[in-house]
Amino acid sequence: NVSEAALQHGLAAGEFWPAFQPQLNLVNGHVCGFEVLARWDSPQYGRVSPAIFIPLAERSGMLHALLLQLMGEACRVAASWPGQFSLAFNLAPSQFLLPTLVSDLLVTVGSSGFPLSRVVIEITESELFHDNASVQQVLDDLKLHGMALSLDDFGTGYSSLTRLNSLPFDELKIDASFVAALSSDMQSLRIVTAVLGLGQSLGLTVVAEGVESTEQAAVLRKLGCDAGQGFLWSPAVPAAQALQLLQQWG
Ligand code: G
Ligand code: G
Ligand code: MN
Ligand code: NA
């Protein structure tokens, strides 16, 4: 059982590192971006799952510090990589209530040498977002500074058509559960088709998550999905391997 103290210590000791999962443009097959996912190698506990340490960090008020550390490191290392790929980061809904969120991100990315215009902020919608004027203001502010906004896990949560229309998103990520059921289940095929139509009519980029087979990729490509991410291409990997993927498939 991982303690808050261990997390705090691990954060100070640099035990957390950014893993990069490539996102492939389904039309030309090139890497168009990476989702950056936090990893923790603890000398005490070994590799700790994000499903454990992300909620723990959030409960103990350390998630924001963790994200800034991760973002700084990922942006610094990727600043020297070739190409126009984006870097996507997951923010928890609670982070949008921090008055310093926008300035923290600007300072962190700004000092890294990676362009703000290629930073994507992924958000899983929650009830927090409903009719919250200050959250709306933060999202507008992030956009104003050139960052892109992506609605993560689309189809699973609170996302409503009304919110989609009023919040300034650039991208939708189709949840992996729909992609997983694509080949076997007509209902999933209909849902994915509908989400793609919705995304296209709102002018959003659509990214499919959890693509594991060439069949799934083929169906998504045929339906006009813009990009895919998943074990078919690569899991999230350390920076050195991510650079190799970029050199292979960039
Ligand atoms: O990488 P998987 O790799 O197992 O990630 C598990 C979960 O942890 C996912 O839901 C992912 O969104 C979340 N996660 C990973 N890294 C981060 C992070 O830096 N911030 C937040 N908020 N969630 C993260
Ligand atoms: O919640 P979020 O979508 O940010 O997190 C992405 C999660 O999906 C991570 O845990 C990541 O390791 C996982 N993931 C990435 N690609 C695949 C895949 O192809 N199949 C499955 N089952 N999980 C994946
Ligand atoms: Mn995500
Ligand atoms: Na997701």
Image (cartoon, rainbow, N blue to C red):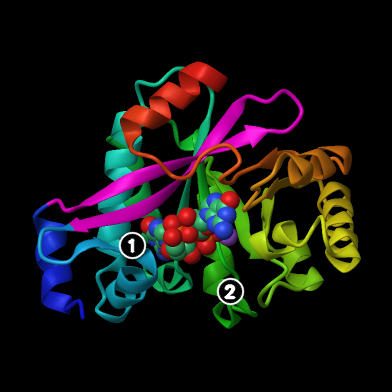
The verdict on residue 127 being magenta is no
Residue 54: quarter of image = bottom left
Q: Position of residue 221 (x, y in %)?
A: 81, 38
Which residue corresponds to mark 1?
100
Which residue corresponds to mark 2?
133
| Along the line of sight, the residue nearer the viewer: 208 or 146 | 208
Q: Where is residue 190 in the image (x, y as percent from the top left)?
A: 90, 62
Q: Few, some or many C-alpha atoms within 10 Å of disc 1 (few <14, some 14-19, many ≥20)?
A: few
Residue at 51%, 39% (x, y): give it: 234
| Along the line of sight, the residue nearer the viewer: 213 or 18 | 213
Residue at 83%, 61% (x, y): give it: 184
Q: Few, some or many C-alpha atoms within 10 Å of disc 2 (few <14, some 14-19, many ≥20)?
A: few
Amino acid type, mark 1: Thr
Residue 227's label in the rendered image is: none
Q: Judge left or right: residue 240 versus residue 214.
A: left
State the extent of the magenta-drawn residues as a range. 14-41
Q: Quadrant of the C terminus?
A: top right
Q: Position of residue 80 (x, y in %)?
A: 35, 21
Callout 1: SS: loop
Q: Quadrant of the N terminus?
A: bottom left
